[in-house]
Amino acid sequence: MIAADPHLSPEERAQLLTWLDESRQEFFQAIDGVSIEQWAWKPADGRWSVGEGAEHVVLSEALLFGLARKALAAASNPAWQAQTDGKAGLIASVMPATGKAVAPDPIVPRFGLTHAQVRERFEQQRADIARFARETDAALKAHTHDHPMRFFGTLNAHQWLIYVPLHTIRHSRQIATVKNQPGYPRAV
């Protein structure tokens, strides 16, 4: 097997930056313009409100970017190519789907963040992530970290970065679904 380049190609960087931009737009489209009542409304017991879904996104982005950085802080993994091959495509196909999943405890919404708090934290975190994605010259693919829930197994830092916007798209679509549920408070 010929060793692949562990650095981002120009196409991979461009795709990551596109996903970051598109997911930011989709997230704000999903959460902006909702009233306090709409922010807190839940379609059923055990389901998240718009506000809880938005808070989960903020918590998740911080965690996922942290995992990318944790991967980079670790020594280069000589088996990175064999352990992570094809997973970028898997993440791209799985994450935008809107099916139900169970969030790990650290990213379960429980702080009751307001719309303004979510927006501020999201913008700050996303600016850091986008700057990193634009500027890094690190061999992202050679540094790996295992998925905490083993869902994707071992991922490299590039794949953790891909996970960020695609997970946000997933939850932006779930938020849009909540807003289309019967009983969702309508604007007056």
Image (cartoon, helix red, strand yellow):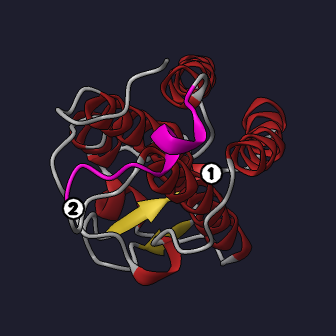
The residue labelled by disc 1 is 140
* Camera-side residue of 97 and 100: 100
Q: Please tell me which residue is depicted at 60% across the width and 66% down the height of the picture.
A: 63
Q: Residue at x 48, y 26 (%)?
A: 30
Q: Check disc 2 and report the residue beneath it.
A: 101
Q: Nearer the viewer, residue 2 or 33?
A: 33
**For the residue labelled by badge 1, is the local secondary structure a helix, a strand or a loop?**
helix
Query: From the viewer's perspective, is 66 left or right of 54?
Result: right
Residue at horizontal 67 percent and vertical 50 percent from the top? 139
Residue 22 in view here: yes
Name the amino acid, label 1: Leu
Circle 1 crowding by C-alpha within 10 Å: few under 14, some 14–19, many from 20? many
Q: Is residue 107 above or below residue 89?
A: below
What's the CA distance linking mark 2 and mark 1? 27 Å
Is 22 part of what is drawn in magenta? no
Query: Which amino acid type is marked by label 2?
Result: Ala
Q: Position of residue 39 (x, y in %)?
A: 51, 44
Where residue 33 sits: x, y (%)?
Answer: 60, 22
76, above or below 99, in the image? below
- The circle drawn on residue 163 is none
Neighbour tally class for label 2: few under 14, some 14-19, many 20 plus, Cα within 10 Å: few
Can residue 1 be seen here?
no
The residue lying at 56 percent from left, 47 percent from top is 161
State the extent of the magenta-drawn residues as a range: 34-44
Q: Quadrant of residue 66?
A: bottom right
Residue in the foreground of this view, choosing between 84 and 26: 26
Q: Earlier in the sequence, mark 2 or mark 1?
A: 2
Q: Residue 94 placed where, x, y %?
A: 22, 42
Regarding mark 2 in the picture, which secondary structure is present there? loop
Residue 157 lies in quadrant = bottom right
Position of 162 with respect to 93 (left or right) is right
Is residue 39 within the magenta segment? yes
